[in-house]
Image (cartoon, rainbow, N blue to C red):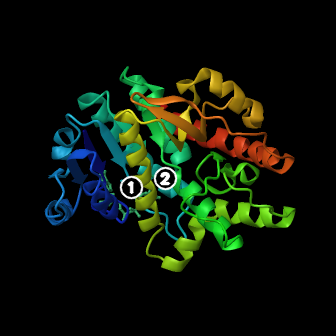
């Protein structure tokens, strides 16, 4: 039985994510925190007939209470990417928000699992790690960047090409990071053989890497993915809650490779260089990351090349995150 705080609960991702967590039978307490609008969201969701108790926390003055006695904090707070906004603009705002929120978690629930959704995840996860290290409470097994949406998109887009595939059951290992070419779907290692030509592999890889842009464009200025992201965040949280309760679960996530030094060696052998963070399928257990899961085969030459491209950009993203905390 798990107490969950959602930080940024009144947002486009936060609202549907809060609703989905209210429906999760493993959740006993749901703390909804935001700097605006959250009392209404919490009152509304609190009427849904499940046993989870919903509490609202509004504004910085209630942040400490929002993150006290929680087992899991999910962080979708921030500003969404809008057309015309540079990655730098987005980074500075969200980096500051994530830093503040993780400082509060470190102070009031240092044992909590933390799932970061706020973008750019390639940098916000290193920011969270640096904050936790500075407070002396960093456990790499408990910190995650949520990359489930990349796997969700990979499964769904694969079905667009191969209508015989069950999108809900298909698993594609996606490694690397969580934006653009740092996202590397290992389509050759999908749980169902897709039988893709080289051209199809290239097209599908690009579609998965830039899937978020399809939503940004279609929303025409109104923001980025919210509903599919909420679904992905809830799926990740459900896996983690089941793992906390003793089930063996494999879920992809962007993690600090220090969580599994042996597995990290293998990951680095894929061409990831000496990166400290990487998205990988992870075996979860009661204490979080148990080990990096086996990929079930060797990536193709195309995939290894994509990993090398991803690794270079990722190294820069990770450095930017760490430098933000160092000031
Ligand atoms: N503390 C808590 N919540 C905050 C803070 C803060 N300091 N600053 C902003 N928020 C809240 C906003 O009030 C809003 O309710 O975060 C929420 C963000 O919601 P939206 O603006 O609708 O953005 P959304 O589409 O949900 O995306 C949020 O997730 O995928 C990423 O790139 C996306 O980083 C962005 C984040």
Ligand 1's image quarter is bottom left
Give the class, few, some or many, for how many residues have Cα within 10 Å of label 2's Cα (few <14, many ≥20). Answer: many
Query: Could you give the CA–CA distance between mark 2 and mark 1, rounded to whole angstroms?
Result: 8 Å
Q: Is residue 57 left or right of residue 240?
A: left
- Name the quarter where the N terminus is drawn: top left
Ligand 1 closer than 8 Å to label 2 CB: yes
Q: Is residue 163 left or right of residue 140?
A: right
Per the rendering, the mark at residue 119 is 2
Residue in view at x 71 percent, y 46 percent: 310
Residue in view at x 41 percent, y 43 percent: 115
| Residue highlighted by disc 1 | 78
In the image, residue 322 lies at what x, y percent? 52, 34
Question: Is there a contact, CB below 8 Å, between mark 2 and mark 1?
Answer: yes
Q: In this view of the protein, which residue sits in the foreground, 34 or 152?
A: 152
Residue 225 appears anywhere in the view = yes
Q: Could you tell me how many numbered marks the image carries?
A: 2
Q: Secondary structure at mark 1?
A: loop
In the image, residue 264 lies at what x, y percent? 64, 27
User: Can you say whether 17 is above or below 175 in the image?
Assistant: below
Q: Is residue 24 left or right of residue 173?
A: left
Residue in view at x 32 percent, y 59 percent: 20
Q: Is residue 81 left or right of residue 65?
A: right
Whichever of labels 2 and 1 marks the residue nearer the N terminus, that label is 1
Residue in view at x 18 percent, y 57 percent: 50
Ligand 1 closer than 8 Å to label 1 CB: yes
Q: Secondary structure at mark 2?
A: loop
User: Can you say whether 108 is above or below 151 in the image?
Assistant: above
In the image, residue 95 lies at what x, y percent? 44, 46
């Amino acid at each position: 039985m798990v107490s969950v705080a959602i930080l940024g609960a009144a947002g486009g991702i936060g609202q549907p994510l809060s609703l989905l967590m209210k429906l999760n039978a493993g959740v006993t307490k749901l703390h909804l925190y935001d700097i605006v609008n959250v009392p209404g969201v919490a009152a509304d969701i609190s009427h849904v007939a499940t046993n989870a108790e919903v509490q609202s926390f509004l504004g910085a003055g209630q942040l400490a209470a929002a993150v006290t006695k929680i087992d899991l904090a999910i962080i979708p707070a921030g500003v969404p990417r809008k057309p015309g906004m540079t990655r730098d603009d987005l980074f500075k705002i969200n980096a500051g928000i994530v830093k503040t929120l993780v400082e509060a978690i470190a102070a009031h629930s240092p044992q909590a699992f933390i799932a970061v959704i706020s973008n750019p995840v390639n940098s916000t996860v290193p920011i969270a790690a640096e904050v936790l290290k500075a407070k002396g409470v960093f456990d790499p097994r408990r910190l995650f960047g949520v990359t489930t949406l990349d796997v969700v998109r990979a499964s769904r887009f694969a079905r667009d090409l191969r209508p015989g595939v069950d999108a809900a059951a298909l698993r594609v290992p996606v490694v690397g990071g969580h934006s653009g070419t740092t996202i590397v779907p290992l389509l050759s290692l999908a749980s169902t053989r897709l039988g893709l030509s080289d051209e199809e592999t290239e097209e599908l890889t690009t579609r998965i890497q830039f899937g978020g842009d399809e939503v940004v464009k279609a929303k025409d200025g109104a923001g980025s993915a919210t509903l599919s992201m909420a679904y992905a965040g809830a799926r990740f949280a459900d896996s983690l809650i089941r793992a906390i309760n003793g089930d063996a679960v494999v879920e992809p996530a962007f993690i600090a490779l220090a969580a599994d030094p042996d597995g990290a060696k293998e990951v680095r052998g894929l061409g990831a260089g000496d990166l400290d963070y990487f998205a990988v399928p992870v075996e979860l257990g009661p204490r979080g990351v148990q080990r990096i899961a086996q990929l079930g085969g060797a990536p193709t030459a195309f995939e290894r090349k994509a990993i090398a491209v991803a690794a270079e950009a990722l190294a820069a993203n990770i450095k930017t995150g760490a430098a933000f905390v160092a000031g």
